[in-house]
Image (tube, grey):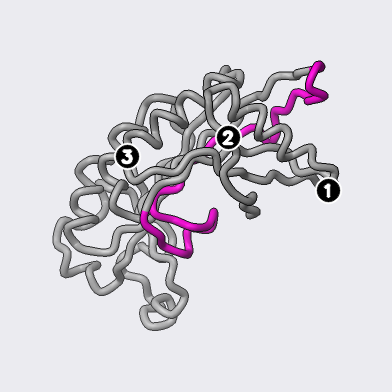
Amino acid sequence: MSVDVAYPIFRTNDPASALRVARQLLTVGIQQYSRVHVDAELRTVEDVLHARKALPDAWFRREDLEDWVRDSDDTTGLHHTIQAPQLSTDPALWSAHLPLWASVKDQPVGSIEDRFTAVAAGHVAEILWDFLEWPEVPEAGLYADFKHAEVSVLFNAATRELDERIDGHTVLVHVRRRNGDGYEERHASWLAEQIGQTVIGPPLHC
C-alpha cells in the first residue's frame, strides 16, 4: 500500500499568509474532486463556545483515553462525537473534559477555510485539502498523482499528528512516497517552485 509524505514549503507567524500560500499551491493541481477538512484543539471554555458559534457544522469530541476511563458512562457524548447544535451551551456539563477537538470534514473547497482560520489561528489545528491531482511533468520526470496529492496547513503544530505545539504556521505539500531515490523531494520542490516557494525542511511522515 502506498503512502504519502509531506514537505514544508512555507512557514510564518501570520495565519492569513499561510492560508494564502496554501491556496496558491492548490492551483497547481486539478481541483475537480477536491474536498477540505479542518480540525482544531480547543483548550478553554471560551475557545469551545467561540468555535461552536463560528462553526455550526462542527463535530466536537474528546480524545483523552484517561478521561474515558474516569467517565465511562459518557453522558456528554464526547467520547465519540457530538455536533455543535447538540453541544450544551452550559459549560458546566462539559468543561471538566477539556480540551475538546472540533472538526468539519468533506466540505467544498473555499467554503470554510477563512472562518476556520479565524477560529484556529491561536490553537493547534489543521486544514487539509485532498483529492487533488498533481499534473504529469514529463520533462521533469514527474508522474501525475491523484491518490497522494494533498495540501495542508499546520497551525502551531510541529507534527502531522498535531501532538506537539510550536509557534507559527506551516504549509505542507503532500506527494507519493517512493523508495529512497529522491523522487519525493524533487516532486515537492517542483510543486513549490510553481508558486515561488521552495522546500524548507525535512519531510513529515504520518
Q: Secondary structure at mark 1?
A: loop
The image's mark for residue 61 is none
Rendering coords of residue 117 (x, y %)? 32, 39
Say whether residue 41 is left or right of residue 205.
left
User: Disc 1 designates what residue?
Assistant: 180
**Which residue is drawn at the image coordinates 70% and 28% (left, top)?**
146
The amino acid type, in three-letter code, at marker 3 is: Phe
Q: Do the CB atoms of the residues marked 3 and 1 lie less than 8 Å apart? A: no
Rendering coords of residue 162 (x, y %)? 47, 58
User: Disc 3 designates what residue?
Assistant: 116
Q: Which residues are magenta?
A: 138-167
The mark that comes first in sequence, 3 or 1, is: 3
User: Disc 2 designates what residue?
Assistant: 198
Q: Nearer the viewer, mark 2 or mark 1?
A: 2
Say whether residue 27 is left or right of residue 133.
left
**Residue 158 magenta-drawn?**
yes
The mark that comes first in sequence, 3 or 2, is: 3
The amino acid type, in three-letter code, at marker 2 is: Thr
Q: Secondary structure at mark 2?
A: loop
Rendering coords of residue 141 (x, y %)? 82, 24
**Residue 36 magenta-drawn?**
no
Residue 138: name its quadrant: top right
Q: Badge 1 local density, few (<14 within 10 Å), some, or many (20+)?
A: few
165 vs 206, nearest the viewer: 165
Q: Secondary structure at mark 3?
A: helix
Q: Badge 2 local density, few (<14 within 10 Å), some, or many (20+)?
A: some
14 vs 109, nearest the viewer: 14
Calculate the distance from the C-alpha at mark 2 to the C-alpha at mark 1: 20 Å
**Which residue is drawn at the image coordinates 46% and 45% (left, top)?**
170
The amino acid type, in three-letter code, at marker 1 is: Gly
Calculate the distance from the C-alpha at mark 3 to the C-alpha at mark 1: 36 Å
The mark that comes first in sequence, 2 or 1, is: 1
